Image (tube, rainbow, N blue to C red):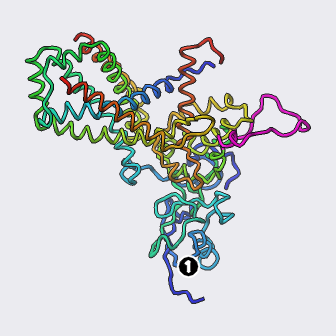
């Protein structure tokens, strides 16, 4: 069958991203975004975090998390613009913005994480 | 029987020969414990105003023709009791998201076309002659699709669906659930015939899983679940095609 | 009903009778119903998940640059508006997690020994996995 719609694969990325975000983002955001800055818990020192980040498994997991989260955002944001603001006539521009943003963000994540 | 209690029905009227958009008309009907909104409408039709138009047939939640918007919610008027809206008034409007032909009557053509597009009947690669007997099915096999077969085509799910409101090309909850009803039937061999419509941009991929179709369904069909399950099926299949393009079609 | 072939979108010119009335969709249709509002808020959680990625990468970049840069990041992330933004983001992410787990059994038809698994155990499995991963991440970060 010669139908090559990207929709199923984008949906798989969206779903995988939704699952990854649901499982991992709450604790990471709570610790680094709220608990450490407010002093509820003492922030880990630099050497410990650097050693964690230098572990290849951490790099791969974090890169995967960033990529999937960004594609998750792209998919949801695209449909929010379509439906919430009724902008479906701008669908090409919106798709470029959303998925282009996700690709650019993933490249940036790769550069940051794998240079550590 | 003395009629002490009464309730006001605010009914949306649309008579295209005399108005360009719907207006409200109020009627007072008896408030009885066993009366539904449909009974109220029938009382209006029989005793107060014979010009009111609406569809109904069975009065028992089987025919699916009396769906309307009651107090803003898509409902079967034969199962919406007047006492639930007491002291009233009860607002009765036509089903949302469909063009209104007259008063509470909406245009069904779009839904009927979509229904036939998904081929909701058993498709066999080769017909089996009658004298070879019936197709057998185990209770487990029937359990796989039975829920979806409860659909009565009342279109409440379309009225509840914001995606259909915004994009009338969307195949929509009931049609996709009915397609799944046959896709999951062990006697059916037509999944490939339904794939093009279901996995088009106006098919399952237009759905954003608001979930209101399932909330609105009076028969517990769960169209939102049917659409999600088909998304998973279609996506897994595309992934297989991508990674294994020379595999079976 | 008119007997002309039903067009997909009956417009003023379609059909023989008078034009059917089409109610326009208001721009802010999702403010009109609680379920629609929750849906739009759920979809907006994606924006905060993207913000989390930015925040995470800023932090990872700072840690890679050295301890001085990491301290500067800590000062920056302690500002009231960054904390406030992260609190709002966490609320949206939690909305995402709860709705995601709640909807998971809809997409999956899990069968065990020929019987369909009921939604309850599927949702419970998700929460269990969430608890385990949360504990593992917290242990990894806090043990140092």
Toward which corner of the image does residue C110 lie, by quadrant? top right
Give the residue displayed 23% in from the left and 35% down from the top.
A30
**Can residue C121 be seen here?**
yes
Q: Chain of mark 1?
A: B
Left or right of residue A60: residue C142:
left
Toward which corner of the image does residue A103 lie, by quadrant? top left
Give the residue displayed 58% in from the left and 59% down from the top.
B67
Q: Position of residue C23 (x, y in %)?
A: 48, 53
Question: Is B203 or C6 nearer to us in this picture?
Answer: B203
Relative to B147, residue A90 above or below: above
Q: Position of residue B68 (x, y in %)?
A: 55, 60
Q: Position of residue C12 (x, y in %)?
A: 56, 49
Question: Is B25 or B210 nearer to us in this picture?
Answer: B210
Relative to C45, residue B239 above or below: above
Q: Which residues are magenta?
A: B119-145
Q: Position of residue C103 (x, y in %)?
A: 45, 41
Q: SS of the residue at dot 1?
A: loop
Q: Is residue A99 magenta?
A: no
Q: Crowding at label 1, few (<14), some or many (≥20) Cα neighbours within 10 Å? A: some
Magenta segment, principal secondary structure? loop
Question: Is C136 or B177 nearer to us in this picture?
Answer: C136
Relative to B88, residue C135 above or below: above
**Can residue B169 be seen here?**
no
Residue marked by disc 1: B32
Q: Is residue B126 magenta?
A: yes
């Amino acid at each position: 069958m010669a139908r090559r719609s990207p929709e199923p694969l984008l949906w798989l990325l969206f779903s995988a991203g939704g699952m990854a975000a649901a499982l991992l983002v709450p604790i990471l955001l709570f610790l680094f975004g709220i608990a450490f800055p407010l002093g509820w818990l003492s922030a880990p020192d630099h050497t410990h975090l650097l050693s964690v980040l230098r572990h290849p498994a951490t790099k791969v997991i974090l890169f995967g998390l960033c990529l999937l989260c960004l594609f998750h955002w792209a998919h949801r944001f695209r449909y929010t613009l379509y439906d919430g603001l009724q902008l479906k006539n701008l669908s090409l521009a919106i798709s470029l913005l959303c998925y282009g943003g996700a690709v650019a963000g993933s490249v940036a994540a790769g550069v940051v994480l794998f240079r550590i | 029987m003395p009629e002490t209690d009464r309730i006001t029905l605010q009914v949306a009227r649309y008579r295209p020969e005399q108005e360009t958009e719907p207006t409200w008309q109020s009627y007072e009907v008896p408030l009885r414990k066993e009366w539904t909104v449909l009974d109220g409408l029938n009382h209006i039709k029989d005793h107060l105003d014979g010009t009111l138009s609406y569809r109904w047939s069975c009065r028992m939640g089987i025919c699916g023709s009396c769906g309307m918007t009651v107090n803003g919610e898509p409902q079967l008027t034969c199962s919406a009791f007047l006492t639930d809206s007491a002291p009233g008034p009860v607002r009765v409007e036509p089903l949302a998201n469909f063009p209104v032909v007259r008063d509470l009557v909406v245009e069904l053509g779009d839904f009927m076309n979509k229904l036939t597009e998904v081929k909701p009947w058993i498709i066999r690669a080769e017909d089996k002659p009658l004298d070879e007997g019936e197709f057998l099915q185990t209770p487990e096999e029937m359990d796989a699709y039975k829920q979806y077969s409860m659909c009565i085509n009342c279109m409440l799910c379309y009225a509840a669906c914001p995606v259909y409101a915004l994009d009338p090309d969307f195949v929509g909850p009931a049609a996709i659930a009915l397609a799944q009803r046959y896709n999951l039937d062990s006697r059916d061999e037509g999944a490939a015939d339904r794939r093009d419509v279901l996995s088009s941009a106006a098919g399952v991929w237009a759905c954003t899983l608001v979930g209101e179709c399932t909330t609105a369904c009076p028969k517990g069909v769960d169209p939102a679940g049917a659409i999600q399950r088909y998304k998973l099926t279609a996506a897994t299949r595309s992934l297989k095609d991508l990674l294994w393009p020379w595999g079976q079609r | 009903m008119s007997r002309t072939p039903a067009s997909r979108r009956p417009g003023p010119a379609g059909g023989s009778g008078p034009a059917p009335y089409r109610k326009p969709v208001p721009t802010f249709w999702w403010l009109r119903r609680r379920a629609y509002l929750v849906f739009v808020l759920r979809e907006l959680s994606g924006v905060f998940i993207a913000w989390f990625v930015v925040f995470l990468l800023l932090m990872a970049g700072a840690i890679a640059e050295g301890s001085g840069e990491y301290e500067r990041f800590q000062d920056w992330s302690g500002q009231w508006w960054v904390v406030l933004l992260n609190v709002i983001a966490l609320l949206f992410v939690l909305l995402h997690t709860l709705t995601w787990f709640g909807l998971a059994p809809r997409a999956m038809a899990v069968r065990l020994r020929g019987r369909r698994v009921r939604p309850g155990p599927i949702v419970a499995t998700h929460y269990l996995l969430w608890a385990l991963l949360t504990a593992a991440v917290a242990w990894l970060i806090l043990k140092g």
